[in-house]
Image (tube, rainbow, N blue to C red):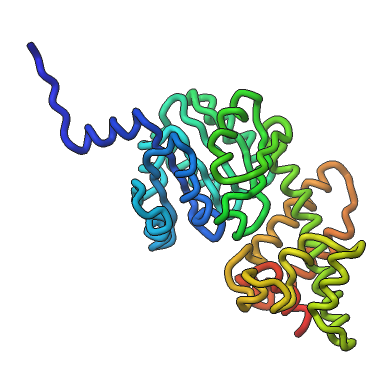
Amino acid sequence: VSVLYWSRSDMLRRTLLTNASYGFIGLGQMGGRMAPNLFKNADCDALYVYDTAAGSGDAVAKAAAGKAVHVCKDAAEVVANCKTVITMLPNGHVVRDVYGSFWDKVQPGTLFIDSSTVDPQTPKDLAAECAKRSARLVDAPVSGGVNAAAAGTLTFMVGGDDQTFNDAKKVLDAMGKNVVKCGDTGAGQVVKLCNNMILAQHMVAVSEAMLMGTRLGVDAGVLAGVVNTSTGRCWSSELYNPFPGVVANVPSSNNYAGGFGAALMLKDVKLAIDAADSVKLDVQGARNACAVYQKMVDSGMGGLDFSGVLKHIDQ
């Protein structure tokens, strides 16, 4: 009788892979809040995480106290240990570089969910590379902000085939309340760019209106209250108002710290303008908002939340 012996580390790794080991790469303002919610999925037994920022993995482990969180040395280690991997990265260049760093570690059958906001072509290219390795990918950018990320109430805009979408939805349901199939691969990015093209313009308009009203002597809370029960009502006014003190627990009430950076909003609006150009559509409103955010970033305020555009305009 032959007996096969496994080392403790081999036994642990095989046990985790037999169950559900989820990976999360990119633990910034959004990803760091999204990742712990994966444990809401009954199949998630262990979470492998990685980010270039020191301490971000430990923060996830602390938020998921009592759960098996493994902080990895690089993205390849995450992929080597997981067959479901979520990525949440700042731009298309970083997405391509990170995926390029682990192609040789991809296991057949791996499902990748990229929740970064990038151009629509990038997920198509990544999905093609995944297919070469018998893996699959959906693009699943998000909307809702940092509070929704922490609460697990995000909206996911997903692009991919029906079966891959259905498999991804089982994972995304742990982190969001609205998981919508927008079309084939890349369609999620198209919808996200449309959304952020609207959002950027709304935030600039709300900032200008709040500043005008308060400079003319109207109380900020009164002004916002009327707008939010009138035709000017929008998310940027009601739930994420840029005027300090109007809404609690949002960046404008915390010196515009945290949240979704103005530099990232500028990136998204530029991607939206490029997408509009590709179909010969003149989006002058988006160009105007882009110019405002460009000046904000150029002035050194790109690290503030995008609602900090009010502070920029108020200078």
Say whether residue 104 is visible.
no
Residue drawn at (89%, 58%), measured in percent from left and top? 284
Say which residue appears at 63% left-offset and 63% top-offset: 260
Percent position of residue 186, x then y: 69, 37
Residue 2 position by quadrant: top left
Left or right of residue 13, residue 83 in this image: right
Q: Nearer the viewer, residue 28 or 170?
A: 170
User: In the image, what residue occupies the spot 73% across and 35% down?
Assistant: 182
Q: Position of residue 129 (x, y in %)?
A: 54, 30
Q: Is residue 76 above or below residue 241?
A: above
The picture quadrant where one finds residue 279 is top right
Q: Position of residue 188 (x, y in %)?
A: 69, 40
Q: Quadrant of residue 140?
A: top right
The reply to whether residue 44 is in sight is yes
- Residue under the image location 87 percent in, 88 percent down: 217
Q: Position of residue 88 (x, y in %)?
A: 55, 49
Name the side, left or right, on which 284 lies relative to 95.
right
Q: Quadrant where the N terminus lies?
A: top left
**Count of marks placed on residues:** 0
Which residue is at the front of the view, 276 or 89? Answer: 89
* Residue sticking out furthest to the top: 1
Which corner quadrant holds the C terminus? bottom right
In the displayed image of the protein, which residue is found farthest to the left?
A: 1
Question: Which residue ends up furthest to the right in the rendered image?
Answer: 231
Left or right of 240 on screen, residue 227: right
